[in-house]
Amino acid sequence: MKRKLLSLVLSAGLVASSLTSLAGCGKATGEIKIWVAENVVEFTKTQVAAFQQANPEYSGYTIIVEPVGEGDAATNMITDVEAGADIYGFPQDQLSRLVAARAITPIGDTDAAWVAEQNDAGAVGAAKVGDVTYAYPITSDNGYFLYYDSSVVSDPSTLEGIVADCEKAGKSFYMEINSGWYQPAFFFGDNGCTLTYETDSTGAFTSCDSNYASDAGVIALKNIIALHKSPAFVNGSSISNATNVGAIVDGTWDSGAAKDLFGDNYAAAKLPTVGGVQLSGFGGFKLLGVKPQTDKDRLEACKAIAKYLSSAEVQLARYDEVGWGPSNITAQQSDKVTSDAALSALGQQLAFTIPQGQYPGDYWSLATALGDSILAGDYDNSSDAELLQVLQDFQDTCNSYAQ
């Protein structure tokens, strides 16, 4: 037995010695800078160290991890590509801007096939511009769904039923209808309406694809108006600021507050149908991008690190550390993720959403104004023809932002 243990120790020592020798022989040197959100900086440092230990051919690189939020990272990269990070996290709605600024490089056919195989369809689509894959998905967890009190809502599958249950119990149903983020839930998806923008190589908006001014659009607008008329309805989307809640449309970022509020009656589900049509909306994803590199070896090192940080194992570890919902299919099927009610509900909802692309700043103000008019009761007694004109004006204004 002692002889066997000694053999194992010697073998381990030889392996360690071999890794050290390989590391010493590695010709790749230099500095690689990574930008990630502040709450995953230490996690990323640990993962990068594990990567270099397992891949000694890259141990010659000094890897620096800095705290830069996803939204800021994209803006900083576009402002000064050369000074930007080699690898950086960003939300999918920034991808077109990064491509236009040449601040991100395509990941190549081999890694693109790997991304498509490993991740859910929404995340795969979010990582592309046209047919080209530019990024490595790391989350599928930015979107909205339904939290509800199971002692109040008997069946979360229809909006009509949810609102009726809340009215009967004297509870509130919360949804933020004067928001360009939540409002499209009534228009997109099975309802058949679209509102998306195309950009040119400079990032300028060149066209708007919208058919809000349609029979389908009128139905969607009437459904929002009907919701606003319910005595149970309250405009809002933050469960931390809500009271007397029976149900609320919110996101994973408020799962802790939802659990605290509902206690044993805590439940979550995808958004309901209304009039038989599934509510849709936007889905959001976090991605890792790699800056274009002139050195081929450095580029391959950056891609290898980004690929590792987006792997199933690391996505699960990141979920354990900070609760980010995985985009990786294998990670999504783990018991710890499937037992997470909020992530499970969001995963079901994302199947009905579109990735949020780029939208002009004025779009968000316009959507707020439309919602504010609904909340003020301006359209409570409007005819279908009058509502169609409201949507035509809305659509024409959206189109004007791309001219």
Image (spheres, grey):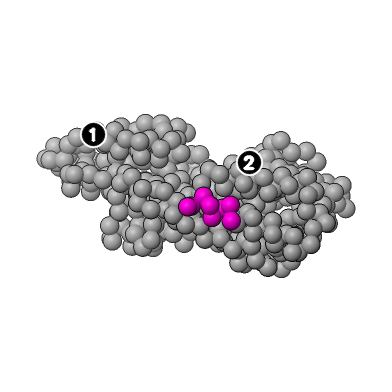
Say which quadrant the N terminus sits in.
top left
Quarter where residue 185 is shown: bottom right
N-terminal-most mark, 2 or 1: 1
Where residue 14 sits: x, y (%)? 17, 42
Q: Is residue 308 visible?
A: no
Categorize mark 1 by other alpha carbons within 10 Å: few (<14), some (14-19), many (20+).
few
**What's the residue type where badge 2 is placed?**
Asp
Residue sitting at x 27%, y 36%:
82
Where does the image place residue 335, in percent across and percent down from the top left? 54, 54
Q: Position of residue 349 (x, y in %)?
A: 60, 58
Was residue 400 drawn as part of the magenta stretch in this picture? yes
**Which residue is under mark 2?**
254
Q: Which residues are magenta?
A: 396-403
Task: Find residue 31 and name its label.
Answer: 1
Image spot of residue 133 (x, y percent): 35, 57
From the viewer's perspective, is residue 18 above or below residue 348? above
- Main SS of the magenta part reads helix
Query: How much space separates mark 2 and mark 1, taking CA atoms?
Result: 38 Å
* Residue type, label 1: Glu
Q: Secondary structure at mark 2?
A: helix
Decide which of 128, 225 is in the foreground and name it.
225
Q: Under tag 1, what secondary structure? A: strand
